[in-house]
Image (tube, grey):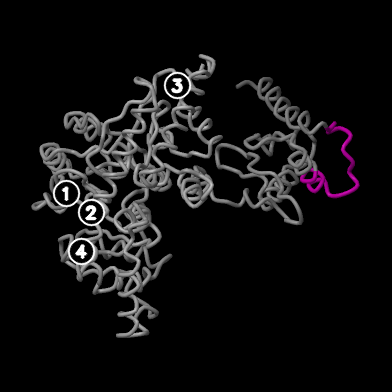
Amino acid sequence: MTAGARVRHDVASVNELFGALRVDPTRMPRTRPFYQRLVDLVEKGLTQGRLDDGFQLPPERDLARALRISRTTVVSAYRELEARGLVRGYVGRGTFVCARPDPGSAPFAWRGKVSAAALQSSRTTVRDLVRDAANPSLLSFAAGQPALELFPTKDFRDATESILSRDGTAPWRLGATEGEPLFREAISERFGGAPDNVLVVAGAQQGLDLLARCLVDPGDAVIVDRPGYLGAIDSFRSAGARLVGWDLLRADAGELEELLLRYRPKLLYLNPTHQNPTGVTLPLRVRRDVLELAARYRVPIVEDDTYRELSLASPPPPSLYTLDQAHNIVIHLNSFSKMLAPGLRLGWISAVPSIVEQLAMIKQRVDPHTHNLSQLVVAELLRNGVFDRHVTRLRAEHRLRRDALVRALRQHVPGGQLRFAVPEGGLYLWCQLAPAVRAEAVREAAMRESVVFLTGEPFYVDRGGAHELRLCYTAQPADRAEDGARALARAIAAAAREPASLATGA
């Protein structure tokens, strides 16, 4: 850039700032510290909405030259604005507006103090679906939860009383970060593996967060199933991973090998049994192919096995963790949220002891130990047969609910407007709309009738899901299926009447 061009650039960036502020810089009063006057002007511009988030301030040297003041004065002003949380400077990039002042008496904008990594975690899908599931005025097919009406309340109460009568202090003491020994032994006896390979976590989501923090560095590639579990996508993305999708519906081992060669990923995350959101179960042949590829390219696998116990037909193939007899490259994740209740916040990771130890050291910083009473009670339910009897009843009820929703959808939604495969387990129907109908438009129309579900976009790490939606068929009793299907049919019809430009995103 020539000297003349550089000067024109300097003037342009300064003029852009003061044009937005509607201030003549040549008439700025000098009766108070000039850096403070700059701070006040920028803060006022933010308050009045004249400077948007992301607006780039002129470089310090350019602003100083244009105003004929020392660069130190501009530096002081920018530092004060950054201290107030209103701007953020990046080495080599410049200084950018990052927030507006908070209302009321707050001395500075708190959002501007939030870390860049935290600001990346802005999607509220999980929080919204949990909130909607607890709202009795909504008919929710969004949150993935089992038939809670079947929860073994009396057995849970009896086990609690038995534990408290034997040792009234046991639930209230500090516990081992790895988990209560009795619970780890019960997990080992019922689900396989050795107790030392078990780390107890507050649900599968905490397990995913721990695994992401333990295994992923910013910039690492992680292969995930596509479409895949949105909680895993959020956890790995928050850790700075570059996410790559493997099409689970095709389950092409050749495609997976190409991805392994091209991206050299740090790990592979799969939910291979009654997958969320599609309900797909990988056949034994594909599971063996995946294990062989992972071993050959030395890529560990995180297997989310949350839905294994919820088969509605023949038992699924053995887990990747069970099949991995030679290489110890699979980390197994499971939870009682889908088998008993999400409110328990109780799950576990099975892995080699060295990984369990590493994960426990990370966990102890924010969660010294998982709730003792829940562990002790569920351990008793596992050992006295209550859990297995409950799962048998749960499967039967889930089959009724699945069949009721499938019948209602086939009856009330005209053919071709909603396609889905009937899953053999899990919690979800994964549905495809007609190409001209947007899932978001259907969701908005359904919300007007107090019916909620999830659209497909959050389940993709790339562009996808605009014409797909997920319905949790287990969340509502069978007698609510008709109401949900009728509302969904009306919502689809309303979305189909959208102008073509909206439906296609043009």
Q: Which residue is mark 4?
A: 197
Look at 16% across and 49% down and name the residue there.
319
Q: Earlier in the sequence, mark 1 or mark 4?
A: 4
Callouts 2 and 1 close, C-beta under 8 Å: yes
Q: Is residue 32 left or right of residue 318?
A: right
Q: Earlier in the sequence, mark 3 or mark 1?
A: 1
Residue 47 in the magenta stretch? The answer is no
Q: Which residue is mark 1?
A: 319
Mark 1: amino acid? Ser
Q: Nearer the viewer, mark 1 or mark 4?
A: 1
Q: Is residue 248 left or right of residue 490?
A: left
Mark 4: amino acid? Asn
Look at 21% across and 39% down and name the residue there.
281
Mark 3: amino acid? Val
Q: Which residues are magenta?
A: 23-40
| Distance CA(mark 3)–CA(mark 1) | 37 Å
Determine the secondary structure under disc 4.
helix
Determine the secondary structure under disc 2.
strand
Q: Which residue is mark 3?
A: 437
